[in-house]
């Protein structure tokens, strides 16, 4: 029985595509039960639909007055219906509170484009590149970690260093980092799955 994933996205869904491709190639023993986006225009929703995966658009705006915790609680209720073994944040641009995380204890993982302890939060790729240019870091990287209420601070599942070359532009560095992210995310899901099956 394949492990059931729910994948949360906010953008183009290239990391989602890496998971879809690994499942199709039978190098990842999982199935995606649902793809959720908090942005209607996220191209990742199109990728999911093209792969025959159910999607859910779940915007934050209707919760502006009642708050994020209500949003997280309702989102968790929607996702529970799909009985996921693992919830994967793959470019999900919303900090999840304990209201959501308590519904899936130790079963929510996140991909972050920086190494542990560096550049938590948004714009990590740009911040890494700028720090390199200032001589503050020698390389950048990415990690997959378990999600806790503190941003990008949960236990690390796997990490990968990504060199920054002297002639890199932000665009060329970003392309290489995304390539590393795709491999790392699939490998991390594989690791977590083997732990779930143990």
Image: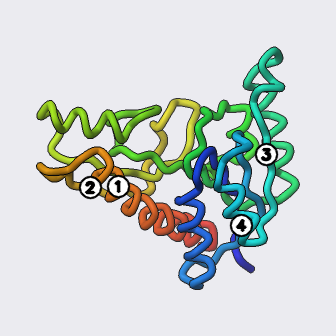
For the residue carrying disc 1, how many other residues have a C-alpha within 10 Å: few (<14), some (14-19), or many (20+)?
Answer: many
The quadrant of the rendering that contains the N terminus is bottom right
Query: Residue shown at 65%/53% (left/top)?
Result: 43
Foreground mark, 2 or 3?
3
The CA distance from mark 4 to mark 2 is 28 Å
Asked which secondary structure carries label 1, the reply is helix
The residue identified by callout 2 is 162
Displayed quadrant of residue 57: top right
Question: For the residues carrying marks 4 and 1, which lies nearer the camera in this image?
Answer: 1
Q: Residue at x 59, y 56 (%)?
A: 13
Residue 130 located left or right of residue 103? left
**Element at label 4:** strand
Secondary element under disc 2, as helix, strand or loop, is: strand
| Residue 174 percent location from the top left of the image | 34, 50
Q: Are marks 2 and 3 in contact (CB under 8 Å)?
A: no
Mark drawn on residue 32: 4
Looking at this view, is 164 or 26 the one in front? 164
Indicate the secondary structure of the residue bearing disc 3.
strand
Question: Which numbered disc covers residue 177?
Answer: 1
Find out whether the residues at labels 2 and 1 contact each other: C-beta distance under 8 Å.
Answer: yes
Distance from Cα at disc 2 to Cα at disc 1: 6 Å
CB-based contact (under 8 Å), mark 4 and mark 2: no
The image shows residue 170 at horizontal and vertical percentages of 29, 44
* Quarter where residue 183 is shown: bottom left
Q: Which residue lies furthest to the top in this view?
A: 65
Residue under numbered circle 3: 57
Estimate the spatial distance between the alpha carbons at disc 4 and disc 1, rounded to whole Å.
24 Å
Taking the image as shown, residue 35 lies to the left or right of residue 164, namely right
Disc with the residue nearer the chain's start (2 vs 1): 2
| Disc 4 to disc 3, C-alpha distance | 16 Å
Mark 2 vs 3, N-terminal side:
3
Label 1 vs label 3: CA separation?
A: 27 Å
């Amino acid at each position: 029985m394949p492990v059931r994933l729910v994948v949360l996205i906010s953008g183009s869904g290239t990391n989602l595509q890496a998971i879809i491709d690994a499942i199709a190639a039978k190098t990842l023993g999982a199935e995606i039960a649902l793809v959720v986006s908090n942005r209607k225009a996220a191209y990742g929703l199109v990728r999911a639909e093209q792969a025959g995966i159910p999607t859910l658009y779940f915007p934050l705006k209707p919760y502006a007055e009642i708050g994020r915790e209500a949003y997280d609680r309702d989102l968790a209720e929607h996702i529970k219906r799909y009985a996921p073994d693992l919830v994967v944040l793959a470019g999900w641009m919303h900090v999840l509170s304990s209201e959501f995380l308590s519904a899936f204890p130790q079963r929510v993982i996140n991909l972050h484009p920086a190494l542990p302890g560096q550049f938590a939060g948004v714009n990590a790729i740009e911040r890494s590149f700028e720090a390199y240019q200032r001589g503050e870091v020698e390389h950048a990287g990415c990690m997959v970690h378990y999600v806790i209420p503190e941003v990008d601070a949960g236990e690390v599942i796997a990490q990968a260093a990504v060199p920054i070359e002297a002639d890199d532009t932000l665009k060329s560095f970003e392309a290489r980092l995304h390539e590393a992210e795709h491999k790392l995310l699939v490998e991390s899901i594989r690791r977590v799955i083997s732990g779930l099956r143990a």
